[in-house]
Image (tube, rainbow, N blue to C red):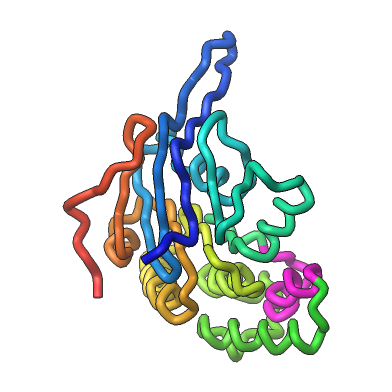
Amino acid sequence: MSAILEAQGLRKLYRGGDGTPIEVLSGVDLAVARGEFVAIMGASGSGKSTLLHLLGALDTPTAGSVRLDGLAYAEQSPAALAAIRNRKIGFVFQFHHLLREFNALENVMMPLLIAGESEDRARSRAEELLAAVGLAGRMTHRPAALSGGEQQRAAVARALAADPVVVLADEPSGNLDHANSEQMHALFARLAREFETALVVVTHNRLLAGRADRVLTLDGGHLVPLSGVESMP
């Protein structure tokens, strides 16, 4: 299958407090196909979140390139990159970051309204997605009235609102209890298949990784296949 998201030779250097260069990524290559679920594991501080930020056009690499849906980030203007983030990439973080003054439906509608969709179209899409993540009966509840698992499911629906070609998730179940974590893991695996969205998840959770099509580990600044993660149905 052809890759929808490609990273080649990604390097990222930071300067320490004394000016010493610290290389976090040392030539990362990654190709993810449409509808593929890839999990990335690694020790704390190994650069997993840094890699996700580069893949999501939230940061720029010291060297190397990223292409999404045929578009090279380095060739885009800041406005074009912003449009790519808004229309082609969905983000899910450990904490849901829902807007507390708006209900679940309004939170999911927000990216579409910002992108210029009509209110009717945004509402219809938001209702469809909230039903898909099991929140059909909770759409009018504000975040404070939702459980932690429900808030995170609403965040997943919001990430899918603009029909992105890739969803990037950083420890999406890290703030949930075991039962809600398992629901989130099953949801990710199902949505990658049903929506044919490429899914890249950074996680410490081996149960979540076990649901992925591929599991990679970030070690010494390089991505390598990880064995020994039990596959889940």
**Which part of the image, by quadrant, shows the C terminus?**
bottom left
**Main SS type for the magenta part?**
helix
What residue lies at 41% left-to-right and 38% top-to-bottom?
Answer: 28
Q: Answer with the quarter of the image where residue 45 lies.
A: top left
What residue lies at 40% left-to-right and 48% top-to-bottom?
Answer: 30
Q: Answer with the quarter of the image where residue 103 lies.
A: bottom right
Q: Decide: is 73 above or below 198.
A: above
Between 48 and 77, the one lying in front of the other is 77
Which residue, as the protein is rendered here, is positioned at the far top? 18
Q: Decide: is 109 above or below 226.
A: below
Q: Is residue 103 magenta?
A: yes
What residue lies at 67% left-to-right and 82% top-to-bottom?
Answer: 126
Between 47 and 75, the one lying in front of the other is 75
**Which part of the image, by quadrant, shows the N terminus?**
bottom left
Q: What stretch of residues is rendered in magenta?
A: 98-115
Q: Is residue 118 magenta?
A: no
Count the marks: 0
Q: Position of residue 13 (x, y in %)?
A: 53, 25
Q: Position of residue 39 (x, y in %)?
A: 37, 56
Q: Position of residue 96 (x, y in %)?
A: 60, 62
Q: Position of residue 129 (x, y in %)?
A: 59, 82
Between 179 and 35, the one lying in front of the other is 35
Question: On the rendered structure, is 201 left or right of 110?
Answer: left
What residue lies at 41% left-to-right and 63% top-to-bottom?
Answer: 2
Question: On the rendered structure, is 24 left or right of 209?
Answer: right
Question: On the rendered structure, is 201 left or right of 53?
Answer: left
Q: Decide: is 11 above or below 5.
A: above
